[in-house]
Image (spheres, coloured by chain):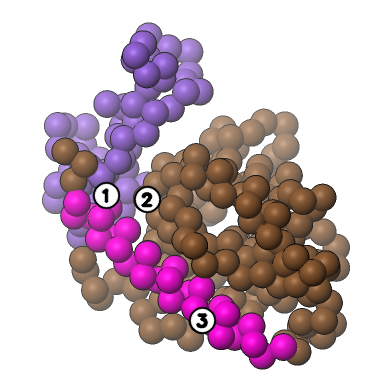
Chain colours: A purple, B brown
Amino acid sequence: MAAVDNADKMICSHCKVEMNHHCDKIVYNVDAQDAGKTDPSLGGIIEEFHTCPKCGGGASRHA
Amino acid sequence: MDASRSLFIPVILGTARMGRMSLHAARLVVAELGSCAGVETDLIDIAKLPLPTNDAGEAIKQADFSAKMSKADALVVVSPEYNHGYSGLLKHVLDSCLKEYIHKAVGIVGVSAGPFGGTRVIQNLLPVMREIGLVTIFWDVNFSIVQKVFAEDGKLLDESYIRRIDKFLKELIWMAKTLRQGREHISLD
């Protein structure tokens, strides 16, 4: 996965363009350090998935 | 979408069993994919992936496999049927990635020595594919009585499979293009 800057809009570090946020997925098997970030209404952590429109590289981060 | 970028559609051979006839099926799909304009492919043999078995999931992610899944626009999984299911090793390999699969297409090729052509393993793989973020197509390829479809040296004995694979791949490529457009340009927000 391409490295990205962790700003509101994720930026592809390779192409320097804004990435497209196309998916949220709930992740249940979280690490201990992430346990406090669990959304109680959903029971897990929301992971955002972003893709660069130029190179197609993907990246993700916790919402 | 940048049309100059080829689609990358690797084929995962989902068995490590000795004497596997699924290897012939996987090689045939790779050959057919390789003849499609604008498509690159590769055969990924799970028997050759150096994944440890003392842990599981993304903790054992293997860099080369992960990179290929990240690059992929779609996947083909070729799987024989083990007691109506898929091999434990295939699940172990698939579970080693997650974010790499999101909103990408997958087509499944079932292989069996019996008459049902892996229909039960395909059915059992569908919920797994869904959970890891892959988008399944509604075409499958079913190699029934596979020992009569291929000679021992891998030569295809039943040419009707070419047309079936062609229909399957057309749907998979359409879905791969559509999902690439979606991933790159259609926002969730």
Left-right relation of B100 to B177: right
Is B145 above or below relative to A18? below
> What is the C-alpha distance between the residues marked 3 and 1?
29 Å
Looking at the rendered structure, the kind of residue marked 3 is Asp
* Quadrant location of the N terminus of chain B in the rendered image: bottom left
C-alpha gap between disc 1 and disc 2: 10 Å
Residues at discs 1 and 2 both on one chain: no
Tell me residue B35's x, y (percent).
48, 86
Q: Are marks 1 and 2 in contact (CB under 8 Å)?
A: yes
Quadrant of the rendering where the C terminus of chain B is positioned: top left
Picture quadrant of residue B27 = bottom right
Q: Earlier in the sequence, mark 3 or mark 2?
A: 2
Could you tell me if residue B40 is visible in this image? no
Count neighbours of disc 1 (C-alpha within 10 A) and say few if under 14, some if 14 to 19, many if 20 or more.
many
Residue on which the image places disc 2: B103
Q: Which residues are magenta?
A: B158-186
Query: Mark 1 belongs to which amino acid?
Result: Thr
Q: Residues within 10 Å of mark 2 (few under 14, many from 20)?
A: many
Residue hosting label 3: B166
